[in-house]
Amino acid sequence: MIPLHRLETLALQHFGRVPVAGFLNRLASGIKAWFPSKLAVNGFAETVSCQEGSFDTVVPTWNWWAPAPVFLACASIAAPFLCSRGFLALGWALQRGFALVCHQEPERSFCIFNGHVAICSRCLGIYLGAGLGLLFSMSRIIALQLLMVAAAFNLLDAATEVAGLHGNWSRVRFGLGLLFGTAAALVVRSAMANKSRSATEGEIHYSA
């Protein structure tokens, strides 16, 4: 486990003045204040210790498949670029492929290279957020609570827009999608970390 101040130092060295760990720490602290220390998950109650290290540490991780969501986001941006450069067949193929997972409404998608990105602003944020979330691991309970908060904000945004309380906020949808994608990826990474840790402990117990 790497302390937050150390992770923030590493983030500042490699990514500039972006206090990633500090942001995650403040976000986790806020979630901890909103939710109880127990949450039912798949019919079981998981208890989170309030000892030092449970909420104030994050672990940077790396897997070769982690850039996959970012690659998909880049592919969606490449679609209008390819069409603008005359590669219509390839651009059209990307558009049709992403149509399987997104409504692709032009007014809800960013415009670039004289065309629209192959996915809406929210989906673009989800893909990029997933790529970010897969680079970190944290407490599973905090990741699940963050996912619940992110889902609630996205639902609130959609409901208020349908109710006519605000207009077409593409940047807001992108930001909320980024939050949701990050939270979902953190849940996946925490689950994988728990599974890997259990397997390791089982091997140690068996060898002993």
Image (tube, rainbow, N blue to C red):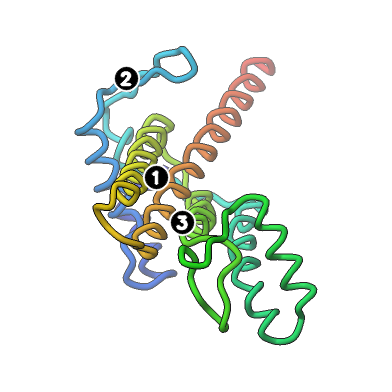
Pointer 2 or 1: first along the chain: 2
* Mark 3 residue type: Arg
Mark toward the viewer: 1 or 3:
3
Q: Look at label 1 and name its amino acid.
A: Val
Q: Secondary structure at mark 2?
A: strand
- Residue 73: quarter of image: bottom right
- In this view, 72 is above or below 149: below
Give the residue type that dot 2 points to: Lys
Report which quarter residue 140 is drawn in: top left
- Secondary element at tag 1: strand
The image's mark for residue 122 is: 3
**Mark 2 or mark 3, which is nearer to you?**
3
Q: Residues within 10 Å of mark 1 (few under 14, many from 20)?
A: many
Q: Nearer the viewer, mark 2 or mark 1?
A: 2
Closer to the camera in the image, 52 or 132: 132
136 in relation to 47, above or below? below
Q: Nearer the viewer, residue 114 or 163?
A: 163
Dot label at residue 58: 1
Residue drawn at point x = 36 percent, y = 67 percent? 12
Helix, strand or loop under label 3? helix
Residue denoted by label 2 = 38
